Image (cartoon, coloured by chain):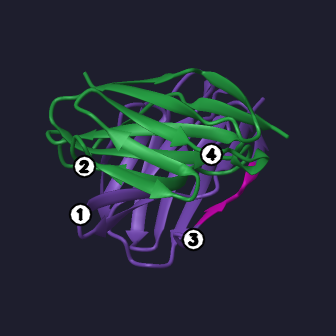
Chain colours: A green, B purple
Amino acid sequence: EDQVTQSPEALRLQEGESSSLNCSYTVSGLRGLFWYRQDPGKGPEFLFTLYSAGEEKEKERLKATLTKKESFLHITAPKPEDSATYLCAVQASNSGGYQKVTFGIGTKLQVIP
Amino acid sequence: DAGITQSPRHKVTETGTPVTLRCHQTENHRYMYWYRQDPGHGLRLIHYSYGVKDTDKGEVSDGYSVSRSKTEDFLLTLESATSSQTSVYFCAIRFRELSGNTIYFGEGSWLTVV
């Protein structure tokens, strides 16, 4: 069974204090790993898709990396507006017709001014 | 903006009543999904559709039905709402891109069953 574990569950950072969020996964053949940002009362907002180990993608202060067992979301010099819950999800290559995507519970990030 | 509109955004209903949530998309995407999100659980797939009148079950489909009579609309129905169906429901669509597929979500429908 596909599994996604995100850590830590919650993270509190001072503005400007860089850190990383972890997403460990177990999947039979990775088709894609997704990162989303979710603000309270909103739907998940797509950030990145990573497809193979070694791949990296960046967007503003965020950088996502992928290995064969985990992904990291690095946040460089975060600002208060980066406060949100960050979700990780994986899609297996043998997930059937509906392209099943398994989500983690998320990491709640709070950036203090 | 993925062009997804969910309605209603908030609803309170009584146990045993039927409830229908609507998802509307503007870009003719083939695949549409209904997820629910609950504390302590990741997003879980309820039902999905891969075309007009083509639907199938996801992980947590018991107590739910869906219909898709037009490409742009995907309806989720709770035939007889229960308190365990109090949740936030997200509609999603799949974008096919050069490098693969990505799922985009709507803004959510908050349902409370009392």
Amino acid type of disc 4? Gln
Nearest to viewer (mark 2 / mark 3): 2
Chain ID of residue with mark 4 = A
- Seen in the picture, residue A80 relative to B101 is either above or below; the reply is above
Observer-nearest of A105 and B82: A105
Q: Main secondary structure of the magenta part?
A: strand
Tell me the number on the disc at residue B99: 1
Label 4, residues with CA under 10 Å away: few <14, some 14-19, many ≥20: some
Highlighted magenta segment, given as a residue range: B5-10
At horizontal 54% and vertical 73% (from top left) the residue drawn is B3
Q: Which residue bears the numbered disc 2?
A: A51
Q: Is residue A35 left or right of residue A111?
A: left
At horizontal 41% and vertical 56% (from top left) the residue drawn is B103
> Considering the numbered disc 1 on the image, is that residue within a helix, a strand or a loop?
loop
Q: Which residue bears the numbered disc 3?
A: B1
Amino acid type of disc 1? Ser
Location of the C terminus of chain A by quadrant is: top right
Label 3, residues with CA under 10 Å away: few <14, some 14-19, many ≥20: few
